[in-house]
Amino acid sequence: MLPRNQRFVHALSASFPEFISGGQTLPAMAYGGPQIQVNGYHLRGPGLSIMDCRQNEFIRTPPNYPFKKVFRVMSYNVLSDNLCQIHSELYTSCQREALDFGYRKRKIIDEILKFRPSIVCLQEVDEEYFQSFYLHELSKNGYDGEFVRRTDANVDGVAIFYKKIDFKLLEWKPVEYFVSKTAILNRGNVGMVMALQPVEYKELRLPTRVCVANTHLLFNMKRGDIKLAQLAYLLANLHQIAQKPDQPAGSYYPSFLCGDLNSTPNSDLCTFIKSGYINYAEKDKYYISGQIHCYPQTRRSFIPASILPPFLSHRCTLLPAATSFAGTATNPSDDRLSATGSSKRDRSPSNSQSEASKTKKSDILAFPQAAAARNEPEVSDSVFSSEAPSAARSSNQFCNMSASTSRAAQPGQDEPWGELRHQFKFCSSYKHTIDRYGYYNVPGVTTMHHGQAGLKVDHIFYAGSKPPQGRYNLLLLNRYGLVSEQEISAAGHIPNMEVPSDHLPIVAEFCLTK
């Protein structure tokens, strides 16, 4: 019998000879070349090639169904050229030539096209390069895409590209994590949600839409409370486009949550995504994202239990009523974010940002028309801004928000303090250890900076649906394996002449059925 790591490659090459390898034959073993030993297991190096270390990890063959669609999803933080220059202290060990975007950009596109994903979620895309480079180059290979820029002074943002031969754009929405006059949602990070329709959904009897969320959450290791707020807002927006009409709550179309979450796999935040529940009351905001493991106990800082504002339920959905918290309903219209169903031709990055500059920061809360006001006690920090549910998924409306909000459960309402829930049944595409090391359970990483520990903060979560008598309609088939912290150290700091970003791309292949 073949060794374990060879069986993975053999089974994969027999069924999918071109999967995640650009048509190239994968190495049969992961341990060729010079060897070093770290903590009892062997690594390749020096002179290590990171890309040679990464192997396909086979999960299952596609089910023997007559109607199915196999496609790949990629998430990739491509390292903003602007941020690379601003935070040059992080890259002092990198070759200067490897940091030049003129060199890196070609390698980034080659890296994307090598995997031929149908859906590509990118983070840290510079606004000036979205249309002039990324869209220009990817459109030559049959892709289209949309972009959302950060709302602060930084010029990067997130983008989702999709292969037009596989999917058709139904709608998309920007998700901006800035809420005026709040002490917790006051950062310029952004996300976006998009609904795509499989081109052959009729012939293959597939679900009529696949929903994708892409985001880059706050980096600050000590502000896990802000990340939790941003994540809940993103889930609320994803719920809006993924909820099946005329179905019970939690009946979702197949969905993906991708991006650089700046949270480690076993953190409270990632556990919340997978389990659908978190009791955040009295959790330490320094530790909730998992980036800090041993901070001085004297610096503990807990998250208060009363952070939910009246327009977001504890189930990460948007409540149907909203009023201004000063007591007067205000819903000034703003077409700036009416991106539903639009394309980049209607809302180009430059146009969207010029419109954004005309809009006051205080006008970035979206609600439906006001209903009855609610009598609520004061809470010091409001957390979430969100868009209102709408059957037609119409353009957003906005109202101002005061710094002090209040909260009290109405009779018959279930609004527990200190808890968040959601009904997406997300699974991670990665198990976060490296298969080729077998029982050693070596953790995989996707990013590593000079003088810092390697972490896995990039994620692809997926959620299918299952009828009472049936099967899940979204199955994980394969994933592109990770590398260890020691392997990155042995190969040289990233970016380098081989790896064009300070993050490694993650890719997974899925099977969609009816």
Image (tube, helix red, strand yellow):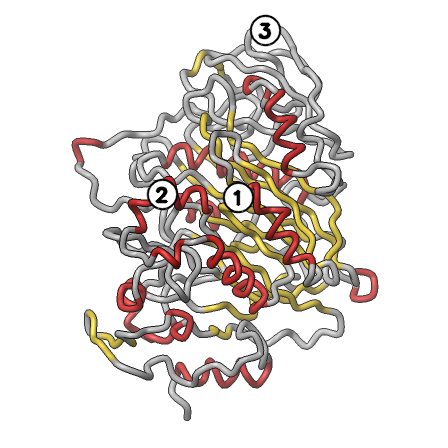
Residue behind mark 3: 327
C-alpha span from label 1 to label 3: 41 Å
Residue behind mark 2: 289
Residue 450 at x, y percent in the picture: 27, 53
Q: Residues within 10 Å of mark 3 (few under 14, many from 20)?
A: few
Residue 426 at x, y percent in the picture: 53, 52
Residue 511 at x, y percent in the picture: 64, 67
Q: Residue at x 42, y 48 (%)?
A: 271
Q: Residue at x 56, y 55 (%)?
A: 462
C-alpha span from label 2 to label 3: 36 Å
Single out the mark in the foreground, 2 or 3.
2
Q: Quadrant of residue 289?
A: top left
Tag 1–tag 2 contact (CB < 8 Å):
no
From the viewer's perspective, tell me whether residue 291 is left or right of residue 68.
left
Residue 199 lies, with reference to residue 299, above or below; the image says: below
Residue behind mark 1: 126
Q: Residues within 10 Å of mark 1 (few under 14, many from 20)?
A: many
Mark before the other along the chain sequence, 1 or 3: 1
Q: Amino acid at mark 1?
A: Asp
